[in-house]
Amino acid sequence: MSSIRVNPYPMPDLLAALEQLQQQQSDATLQLATGSKINKPSDDPAGVAQIIKINDLSSQVDSFQRSISNISGQFSTADSTFSSVVTALQRALSLGVEGANGTLSDADRAAAATEVTGIQSELLSLANTSYQGQYLFAGTATTPPFVVDPTQPSGIRYVGNTGVNKVTIGNGYQLQVNVPGSQIFNGPGADVFLAVNDLITGLQNNTGIPTAVTELGTAFTYVTGQRVFYGNALNQTQSQQTYLNTQSLGLSQQLSSVAGADIPAVASQLVNDQTARTAALDAIARATQNSLFDYLK
Amino acid sequence: MSSLFGTLSLATGALAAEQGAMDATTNNVANANTPGYSRLRPVLIESDPVVIGSLVYGQGVTLQKLEGLRDPILQLRIQEETQQQGQLNTFVSAMQQAQVQFTSSSSDIGSQISNFFASLNQLSTDPTNLSLRQGVLTAAGNLATVFRNTSGNLTQQQSSLDLNVSQAVQQVNTLTGQIATLNTQISQLQGVNQDASAFIDQRDVLIGQLSGLIDVSTIKSDNGLTLTTSNGTALVVGGQSFTLTTQTNASGLQDVYAQGADITSKLTSGQLAGLIQVRDQKLPALLSNLDTLAAGLANALNTANKTGFDLNGNPGGNLFVPPPLSGQGAAANLTVLITDPALIAASSDGTAGSNGNVAVLSGVQSQPVAGGQTPIDYYSNIVFGVGNDVSTSSAELSSSQLVLNQLNDQRGSISGVNLNEEAANMLQYQNAYDAAAKVVTTINDMLYTVINMGTLTG
């Protein structure tokens, strides 16, 4: 009896092997089902820490994108408001120029004065434009910024404030989102409402029309200049949107390189495990079979 | 000179010895699947011969004893590895349970932190919008809830581990009692020079079970077996066992006492050590980290909200119920203080439409609010720690399992019953028995011849 005795109980080893195969199979199946090789922190602790940070960055990028789409609406509305203001002022200017020629009859001038008065109301309403309840040209005030006030030389008073809001649309990137109405419509020496009011008075009284036209011309140029802010802001949000899209794509690529399961590898591993498991089961089934006792008659 | 009767008794002696050997085989076959059973081997020796004159007469065979085959050193290694495994197994399964709380999902702490700051970004685009303000409050509420739930679940797990500690202590006491009883039986049998193999096997099984629970050192002495914990606390001395007790400590958890001394922190392996390690070290550390994060976030956001003005133009107040100064219990009790969305201090100058203070609130996202780290960095480190504990200890568990399997293989190769071997032995004993029986028959014939001798001559 010098030969080495082997453990006659192979079962625990076989069962341990089987259990390990089953564990591998269930891990592989989970990876295929989720498409992710990290399904719990212990799968890759450092990877999980990275994933948490990537997800946080993604969430930030998403929220910047939503902010951009919110403020883009404001910018578009403001820009089209400016476009209406410009059209209205152009009409007022041409009426003024006609009036200044001295060729108009009194009736025509009265009619022109009435039309410019209409334009005045239109401008007031445009200056009080709101977007989803926010007055675009009120600074950070929340009531209509321009009100009729006969005591004012222009007949209109600014009741908004000079507050400016900024919205974060990128990491450390804050974009100014409004220009206070006083800065747009009541520029120094370029008060739109005063110029329009002077033109109305001029047309009505047939005096000082050319001065009023010059005044309106200055105001027109000034307002057009203010419009540039909104055009720029729209451009900036668009290019930031493009940048954020790239960043978002980059983050999802990072995520899939950290967490993404190698599907072909996992699938073939699963097949291998299945084969090994069948073999292990077969071995277990045979392990308990025949001993010498079976051959004793 | 020998006599026929002498030869007859020699042959019947052989029959008895072979029958005894057959007993060993039968017992082995019967116990082929008994855990911890060590196979028996008949020890047959040649009987002392009788010398008469110049002749030496063999006196046949004697079955000296049925010897149990075991390796005590190997048994010790198995016990040690079982202790190691008991500790790792418990540690891994408890930490796996804990890491569920930190598994990435759309509603884990990390996501809720991100969601909260995202809701602030939305508010900045329209600071008077009540539904955006409500969005911030809801996100703050979700953040508080996930902190409370995570912390609560970990505390609950701590209590259930505590219950397991008490149960394990009871099991230890039951086992040490049984081992002491077996010690008595074994030394009684050995005292009269009898084989105590069956009891030793049973005791080895019980010591194995005990090893799974607590660190055990085995000392063999003349008066039996002494079991102590690795720090020297006696569990069993010969026929006497010493029970472990539990006492509630200041944290409301059960400490383990042996003969009046607190041995809770001195247990190094076995299930008890694993339970205590998670209950007293890992979970409290996790809970305290969550507290640090919750308190850091709540304090920073409260401070930020106070620098601004609410929708009504009043100075901002606390957003969250201020956490305790020590930070202890901050996560478990994190609660949003305000219910009126107008009270979020978005404005930096008191005008309703200003969003200037939202940036201050959002700024907390990149402030070192906990352990010198931003909220997300701190949280990701917590999760890394949990994941790392599980993956490291799982690897240790696998290798310990491998070692234990190998040791058990080794034990099996020495003590295990091989049915082929037993069948071969059975045939061998059967043949010898047959032969001895044939000898008896032959001697019987010879005696018959002797008895009938007179008749033949007459």
Image: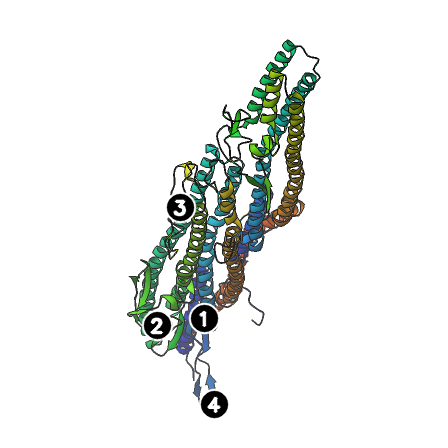
Instruction: Give the Cα separation between the discs numbered 4 and 3.
Output: 115 Å
- Front tag of 4 and 3: 3
Q: Are marks 2 and 1 in contact (CB under 8 Å)?
A: no
The answer to whether dots 3 and 2 both sit on one chain is yes
The answer to whether dots 4 and 3 both sit on one chain is yes
How many residues crowd mark 3 within 10 Å: few (<14), some (14–19), many (20+)?
A: many
- Identify the residue at the far bottom of this view: B53
**Residue wearing tag 2:** B233
User: In the rendered structure, the residue with mark 4 lies on which chain?
Assistant: B
Identify the element where label 4 is drawn: loop
Nearest the eye: B211 or B207: B211
How many residues crowd mark 1 within 10 Å: few (<14), some (14–19), many (20+)?
A: some
- Identify the residue at the far front of this view: A207
> Mark 1: which amino acid?
Leu
- Front tag of 2 and 1: 2
Instruction: Give the Cα separation between the discs numbered 2 and 4.
Output: 64 Å
**Labels 3 and 1: the sequence-earlier one:** 1
> Mark 2: which amino acid?
Thr
**Labels 2 and 1: the sequence-earlier one:** 1
**Labels 2 and 4: the sequence-earlier one:** 4
**Residue wearing tag 3:** B318
**Labels 4 and 3: the sequence-earlier one:** 4
User: In the rendered structure, the residue with mark 3 lies on which chain?
Assistant: B
Q: Residue at x 54, y 39 (%)?
A: A165
Nearest the eye: B179 or B438: B179
**Residue wearing tag 1:** B76
Instruction: Give the Cα separation between the discs numbered 3 and 1.
Output: 62 Å
